[in-house]
Image (tube, rainbow, N blue to C red):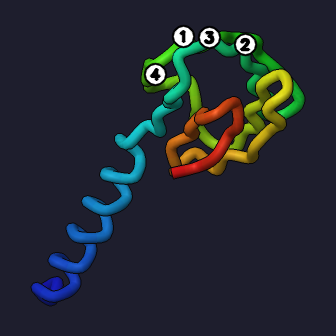
C-alpha cells in the first residue's frame, strides 16, 4: 500500500509543475510607441513587433533573448514577464 503522505506530496508536486507550465510570460509595452523586436532562441531568430500600450501573451517561451533597436537586449528564462518602459527592456 502507498503511504498517504507520499500520494499527497506527489499530487502537490504535480500541481506546482502544471501551474508553471501553464503560465505563459507576457510581453508588455508600457510606452505609447510601437517597437520592432528580435527574439532569438536556439540559433534561430524571429522578427516581430508590439504596438504601444499593449500586452501580448505567447510570444515568449523558454530561454530566449529579446532585443529592441536602441533599447538593448534581455535574456528570458521563460518564467518572467518582459516589460518595455521608456524604450528599455526589463523583467517583472
- Residue 85: image location, x then y, percent: 59, 35
- Whichever of callouts 4 and 3 sits on the residue coming sooner in the sequence is 3
Query: Pointer 4: what residue?
Result: 56
* Distance between the alpha carbons at the discs numbered 4 and 2: 14 Å
- Numbered disc 2: secondary structure: strand
Q: Helix, strand, or loop for circle 3?
A: loop
As displayed, is residue 13 above or below residue 2? Answer: above
Answer few, some or many: residues within 10 Å of disc 1's Cα (few below 14, many 20 plus, some between 14 and 19): some
Q: Is residue 2 left or right of residue 90?
A: left
Q: Residue at x 68, y 11 (%)?
A: 48
Quarter assignment of residue 42: top right
Mark 4 or 3: in front is 3
Going by the image, does 61 lie left or right of 11?
right
Which image quadrant is residue 66 in? top right
Q: Secondary structure at mark 4?
A: strand
- Where residue 62 appears, x then y in whole percent? 62, 42
Mark 3 lies on residue: 34
Q: Are marks 3 and 2 in contact (CB under 8 Å)?
A: yes
54 shown above or below 42? above
Query: Label 2 to label 1, Cα distance in Å?
Result: 9 Å
The residue labelled by disc 2 is 36
Of the two numbered discs 4 and 2 on the same chain, state the one appearing first in sequence.
Answer: 2
Sort mark 4 into few (<14), some (14-19) or many (20+) by Cα contacts within 10 Å.
Answer: some
3D distance between C-alphas at marks 3 and 2: 7 Å
What whole-number distance in Å separates the C-alpha atoms at marks 3 and 1? 4 Å
Q: State the SS at label 1.
A: loop
Say left or right for 40 vs 86. right
Q: Where is mark 1, residue-wise? A: 51
Amino acid at each position: 500500500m502507498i503511504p498517504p503522505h507520499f500520494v499527497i506530496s506527489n499530487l502537490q508536486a504535480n500541481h506546482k509543475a502544471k501551474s508553471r507550465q501553464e503560465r505563459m510570460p507576457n510581453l508588455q509595452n508600457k510606452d505609447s510607441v510601437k517597437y520592432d523586436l528580435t527574439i532569438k532562441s536556439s540559433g534561430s531568430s524571429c522578427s516581430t513587433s508590439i504596438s504601444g500600450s499593449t500586452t501580448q501573451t505567447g510570444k515568449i517561451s523558454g530561454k530566449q533573448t529579446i532585443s529592441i533597436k536602441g533599447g538593448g537586449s534581455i535574456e528570458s528564462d521563460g518564467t518572467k514577464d518582459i516589460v518595455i518602459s521608456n524604450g528599455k527592456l526589463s523583467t517583472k
